[in-house]
Amino acid sequence: MTILVTGSAGFIGANFVLDWLAHHDEAVVSLDKLTYAGNLANLQSLEADARHTFVQGDIGDQALVAELLEKYQPRAVVNFAAESHVDRSIHGPEDFIQTNIVGTFRMLEAVRAYWKGLSGEAAGTFRFLHVSTDEVYGSLSPTDPAFTETNQYEPNSPYSASKAASDHLVRAYHHTYGLPVLTTNCSNNYGPYHFPEKLIPLVIHNALAGKDLPIYGDGQQIRDWLYVKDHCSAIRRVLEGGKLGETYNVGGWNEKANLDVVHTLCDILDQEQPRADGLSYREQLTFVKDRPGHDRRYAIDASKLERELGWKPAETFETGIRKTVRWYLDNQEWVNNITSGNYRDWVSKQYQ
């Protein structure tokens, strides 16, 4: 048996492929466009693994997706492929429309045609699992209950609006065509292989480089933090036992303000790799102008996933964040290979 994983060289996709092959002998066909955030080095440990096949390509290339489906006959498609950075969506929303909406549509068309050609058990057991975000639900006040699967969609950025549209397309293909779909909406992920434009890897990288640690606004934006390997285990569980057409929220039960996360990172780095001058990395904190339309709070209620499928995260924020810092300290070559001139130019522009 085989599964097709799209966006497999990105942060979450790569972690999923690595974890899948650590838990299963079932083969994986990986599809990734290898844009700036797609990095084959994430999958380097699988170069000699006969269970893994990598294909460079775009989910918006309907003919390519159809060809891969026909050639490898996967029993499931797990879709991570997406443009996923809010800041980049503000500066250049068109890429998000093309990948997250048009790309998802074209992939769904290829998958629908493939699924219709299956028969018997192969048709009955086939699954299309779409990985999405809690940002489609909008923003919460400090006293609002956490997002559940029945929350109204209220996206506030071009990124979250494009992901909301992709969620709606997946739902529509189930209700209109009967396509056997599952959707997961996750909270903020962190962990190994995270591209260093996002908060946690950016802070670690800048701290070690002696640079400013930029904090948007007052730093009191609250997010629910989910260790990426916990997210991977949740997706495996939903793929295994999820009810067709259903949505499952995946969260870490770890609400933290951004400023508190940065303080925690500084304190761990003070212990693990102290500054040469003996001062705390907190000395490098700097507050910058808040980004447009910055959502104040996200929080995920993942009780449906626990109640129906028996899943809950294995890591607390405290255990997961220490593992994450340790990974970045032990993998500085990976970080240095990623932080190219284009990346430095982007960070300079975004946090000027």
Image (spheres, rainbow, N blue to C red):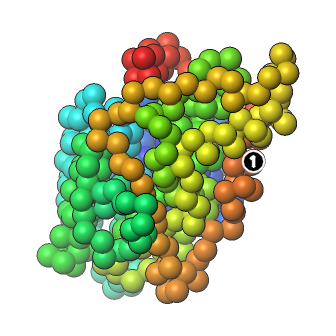
Viewer-nearest residue: 186 or 36: 186
> In the image, 348: left or right of 274?
left
Q: Is residue 93 visible?
A: yes
The quadrant holding residue 76 is: bottom left
Give the residue drawn at x 59%, y 20%.
212
Viewer-nearest residue: 302 or 234: 302
> In the image, 103: left or right of 80?
left
Quadrant location of the C terminus in the rendered image: top left
Give above or below for 195 relative to 116: above
Viewer-nearest residue: 251 or 179: 251
- Image x and y of residue 75, in percent: 43, 70
The quadrant holding residue 209 is: top right
Give above or below for 334 relative to 147: above
Tell me how many marks there are.
Answer: 1
- Image x and y of residue 310, in percent: 58, 83
Farthest residue toward the left?
A: 176
Give above or below for 151 relative to 61: below
How would you rate the neighbour count of disc 1 (Cα within 10 Å): few for under 14, some for 14-19, many for 20 or more?
some
Task: Name the residue carrying label 1.
Answer: 322
What amino acid does circle 1 point to?
Arg
Give the residue drawn at x 23%, y 35%.
93
> In the image, 345: left or right of 213?
left
> In the image, 3: left or right of 320?
left
Dot 1: what SS?
helix
Give the residue drawn at x 69%, y 49%.
321
Viewer-nearest residue: 194 or 116: 194
Q: Is residue 186 visible?
A: no
